[in-house]
Amino acid sequence: MSAFRQSVEAMIPALRRYARALTRDADAADDLVQDTLVRALRSERLFLGGDVRSWLYTILTNLNKNRRRSLARRPQFTQLTENNPDASGTEAEGRDIERALATLVEEQRSVLLLVMLEGMSYREVADIQGVPIGTVMSRLARARAHVKASLEGERPALRRVK
């Protein structure tokens, strides 16, 4: 197996983790990762060296943008869930965090996940998203403020992204 393929294979768990956090749907995330891997392996000859990790995250991010555009054209169905008042504190806190992340605009959520969950630098995130570093910093600050306000019970203002 080539070094390139080994590097791609080593990234699968991180790609799955990011895709699941980004899509909030295990099946959609697995499809997204599979499409990312297929595209990367088919395009191996186009990879000019450098950081495989950033390249794979860029592919995944672009595929997710395409997926979101496609979903925006379809009607949305909301799943009904039961509210369990007897849930333990950690379960309730987890749901609160999940709700706060779900209310973020996509660009802010993806920056927050790449920096906080994947431990990427601002420069790496800027390259993946194709935006200046200042935009990454701005999106991250707004995302953090939004999540904090949500967790403190405030109604955070929804802002458009740069």
Image (tube, grey):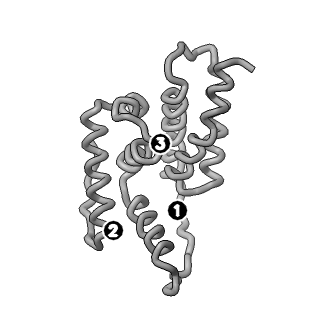
Q: Residue at the location (52% across, 42% down)?
A: 64
Mark pair 2, 1: CA separation:
26 Å
Residue 77 lies, with reference to residue 49, above or below; the image says below
Q: Which residue is mark 3?
A: 118
- Quadrant that contains the C terminus: top left
Q: Amino acid at mark 1?
A: Gln
Q: Amino acid at mark 3?
A: Glu
Q: Which label was assigned to residue 76?
A: 1
Q: Residue furthest right?
A: 1
Residue 103 lies, with reference to residue 57, above or below; the image says below
Assess disc 2: are there few (<14), some (14-19) or many (≥20) residues with their C-alpha within 10 Å of its C-alpha.
some
How many numbered badges does the structure rendering display?
3
Say which element carries label 3: loop
Q: Which residue is mark 2?
A: 151
For the residue pair 125 and 102, the one nearer the viewer reads as 125
Residue 100 lies, with reference to residue 141, above or below; the image says below
Mark pair 2, 3: CA separation:
22 Å
Residue 99 lies, with reference to residue 62, above or below; the image says below
